[in-house]
Every structure is written in C-alpha cells, then in structure tokens.
Image (spheres, rainbow, N blue to C red):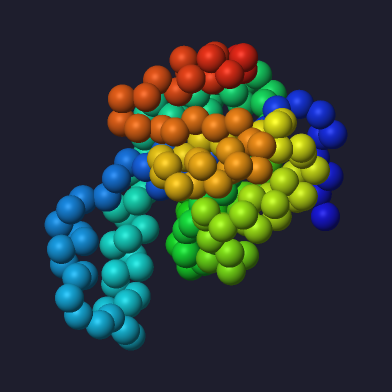
C-alpha cells in the first residue's frame, strides 16, 4: 500500500474533457443504434482510446507547473477498465499522478459519493485538502457536497486563474 503525504493540497483531476479533449462527433455517430460485441467491441475500444488520447495542452501546462512545484497530483476518471490499463502502459500522462482511480476498476462511478470517499481514504486526505477539477457539473456538485474545493472546467476556463482564486499556486 502506498503512503501519501499527511498534509498539503491534493489536486484531483478528471481525465475526459479535462486532460483530454473531446472525441470527434463522427465516432459517436458510428456506434449509435446497434448492439456491439466481439470484434466490433474490440475495434470500438481501440477507436475510443485513440479519440480520447488527444490531450489538452492548457491542462498539461498546469500539470507541468504543479508537478514542478512538487504538488500532490491524483486522477479520478470514469474510464473503463480496459482503457485505463492501455493508457497506463502506453501513455505518458499517467506519470503525473501519484494516485490514479478508475471507475472501471473500482466498480463505482462519479458522481456517486462512495467513489469520492474511497479516493479521500486512499489519499489520506480531508475533503478540504482536495481540489477536484472536472468538466461535469454533477461530479463537481457531488465532490463539493462532501467538502472538497472544486473547479468546473469548461472550454474557456483559465485553470491557473481558478486555482489562484482558491488560494492555490498556479
């Protein structure tokens, strides 16, 4: 079991539309309206992983800055299990995070409160010591209800400015 620092702020990032950009609309049109299985499912998982692998350079700049400052970084994503294993073995971005929590592995999803409690326990952090960054209002509201500080990330959000408003270095 990994032991994390007992004090200091944790920055808890979502993946989809926070670290990654939004996938192409054509992809979703290609999978709607019919059941999927077997080879089709394998192919769609491959396409899904590729489409979600386009990274958001603005978020990466903030991650670079926070990592250089020695900040405590963690990830909480509603990513499927297979995709999470793929990214951990093939992508560089998981290296930013001291702790990574994936819904597909945990069998819990955001915005259910138990996933946030699981993460807090795993980090050994009080809710007020966590800044949760996500693009979903429902996920943000659930984390905030537990006492976490939050940033709702939209396309026009200046993440550095939002962190500064929370009193965090950015």
Query: On the rendered structure, is 37 left or right of 90?
Result: left
Query: On the rendered structure, is 55 left or right of 149?
Result: left
Residue at the bottom extreme, as displayed: 38
Query: From this viewpoint, is residue 94 visible?
Result: no
In this rendered view, identify the residue nearer to me: 128 or 61. 128
Q: Residue at x 72, y 31 (%)?
A: 129
In this rendered view, identify the residue nearer to me: 125 or 142. 142
Spot occupied by residue 114 in the image (x, y as percentages of width and height): 65, 58
In this rendered view, identify the residue nearer to me: 167 or 5. 167
Q: Residue at x 60, y 42 (%)?
A: 145
Spot occupied by residue 134 in the image (x, y as percentages of width and height): 47, 40
Query: From this viewpoint, is residue 129 visible?
Result: yes
Query: On the rendered structure, is 82 left or right of 156?
Result: right
Query: From what the image shows, is residue 156 above or below residue 33?
Result: above
Q: Residue at x 72, y 46 (%)?
A: 120
Spot occupied by residue 94 in the image (x, y as percentages of width and height): 55, 45
Task: Pick the quarter of the image with the C terminus.
Answer: top right
Q: Residue at x 16, y 67 (%)?
A: 30
Query: On the rendered structure, is 37 left or right of 151?
Result: left
């Amino acid at each position: 079991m990994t032991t994390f620092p007992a004090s200091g702020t944790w920055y808890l990032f979502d993946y989809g539309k926070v670290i990654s950009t939004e996938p192409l609309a054509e992809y979703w049109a290609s999978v709607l309206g019919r059941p999927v299985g077997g080879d089709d499912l394998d192919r769609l998982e491959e396409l899904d992983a590729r489409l979600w692998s386009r990274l958001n350079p603005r978020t990466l700049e903030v991650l670079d800055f926070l990592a250089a400052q020695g900040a405590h970084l963690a990830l909480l994503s509603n990513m499927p299990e297979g995709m999470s294993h793929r990214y951990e073995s093939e992508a560089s971005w998981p290296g930013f995070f001291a702790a990574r929590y994936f819904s597909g592995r945990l069998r819990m999803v955001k915005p259910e409160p138990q996933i946030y409690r699981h993460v807090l326990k795993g980090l050994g952090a009080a809710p007020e010591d966590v800044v949760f960054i996500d693009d979903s209002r429902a996920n943000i509201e659930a984390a905030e209800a537990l006492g976490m500080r939050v940033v709702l990330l939209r396309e026009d959000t200046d993440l550095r400015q939002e962190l500064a408003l929370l009193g965090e270095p950015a």
